[in-house]
Amino acid sequence: MNQLPAIPVVDARAGGPLAHAAERQAEMEALRACCVAYLPAAARPFLPLADALARLWLVRSASPYVEEVHAIARLAGGAGVYMVNTSYQWACTVAARAPGTNAPMLVRTLDWPFAGLGRHVAVARQAGPAGEFWNVTWPGAVGVLTAMAPGRFAATINQAPLYRRTQVDWLRFIDFAANALRTFSRMRHAPPDHVLRQAFETAPDYAGAKEMLCRLPMARPVLITLAGVRAGEMCVIERDETGAHVIEGPITVANDWQRARPGWEPRSCGGAVTTDSHERAITLAARVAETARPFDWLVPPVLNGMTRVAVELGAGDGTLRVVGLESSSRAVPATPATQMLDLVEEQVAA
């Protein structure tokens, strides 16, 4: 483990994600190359067109970070920046808990098939009018999927289940295409990860973040798990584009509604579609209840061949632990690709 690279911590308080991308431009290009290499050879020539369509949609959206994405795209050596910043396609598993003490904690994995997301992960120290926050991110990304604002709140994004118009497995691609077309043609709201960044920049506390994340419309359905600094400040916000349903914690979230809804299908991270999300949630709930050491909860199927990042975070005491992971195959659980970053230990040492 000690031979693995350390996760970089980037001070982006002044320049935000643009400063992060400029500082780590080589890593941004390496990550883009990894993601492009994953695509079928026949699809790669169409990447500039897909990126242009993503740019068109983003410009028409309500995202306040469009100019920032434009600037990052000018830094990049090829297409892909607009697609990354409008994708919102990560599947994941997260638990909100209060271990031992009453201080809420979040533990989560982020799962995605692209190689490189694990070894290129970084932690950016960012700031907004409400204060500073620590964002688990990548160079070139402007949104927030996993972050912690000391003394205020911590939050994560999970991909919501898939809305199905068809009922047959082999027609699932039609549902993906129809949902994407609906978003492109009709939705002008900001992507969920852009809205979550707004909350970290402007919400003064857990209550303010919850209100904002329930009120602001979003471009796609999403699951947002939120934890504050006091006992009982834990919830999952189940969002569609304009409405919100809040379920108070402690709670475990994978890629399904807490109560199944007709027409919606849980997301899978490699297991059976009907059971994978449920099994990840059940396993994580059991593990966090009985383990105390960092990442003892990271076991299959929570850990799987698409797991790229695992995180533990708590706003009450400033806990932020991150490890990047990679796998050679979807059938093989991922293994560490970085050293574990423990923000508290690093700050004490500094």
Image: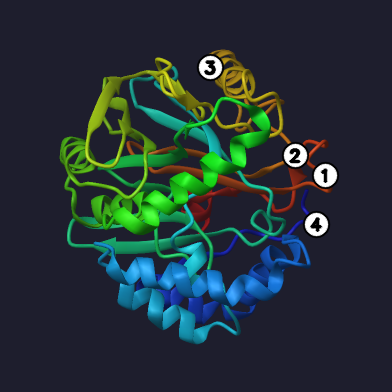
Q: Is residue 40 left or right of residue 175?
A: right
Q: Mark 3 highlights which residue?
A: 285
Q: Is residue 1 left or right of residue 170?
A: right
Mark 4 or 1, closer to the camera: 1
The answer to whether residue 249 is seen in the rendering is: yes
Secondary structure, mark 1, is loop
Mark 1 or 3, closer to the camera: 1
Secondary structure, mark 4, is loop
Position of 234 relative to 40 (above/below): above
Mark 1 near mark 2, Cβ–Cβ under 8 Å? Answer: yes
Mark closer to the chain start, 2 or 4: 4
Where does the image place residue 309, in percent across and percent down from the top left? 61, 46
Residue 3, numbered circle: 4
Type of the residue with mark 1: Ser
How packed is label 4: few (under 14 Cα within 10 Å), some, or many (20 or more)?
Answer: few
Q: Return the residue nearer the eye: 7 or 192.
A: 192
Compute the Cα span from label 1 to label 2: 6 Å
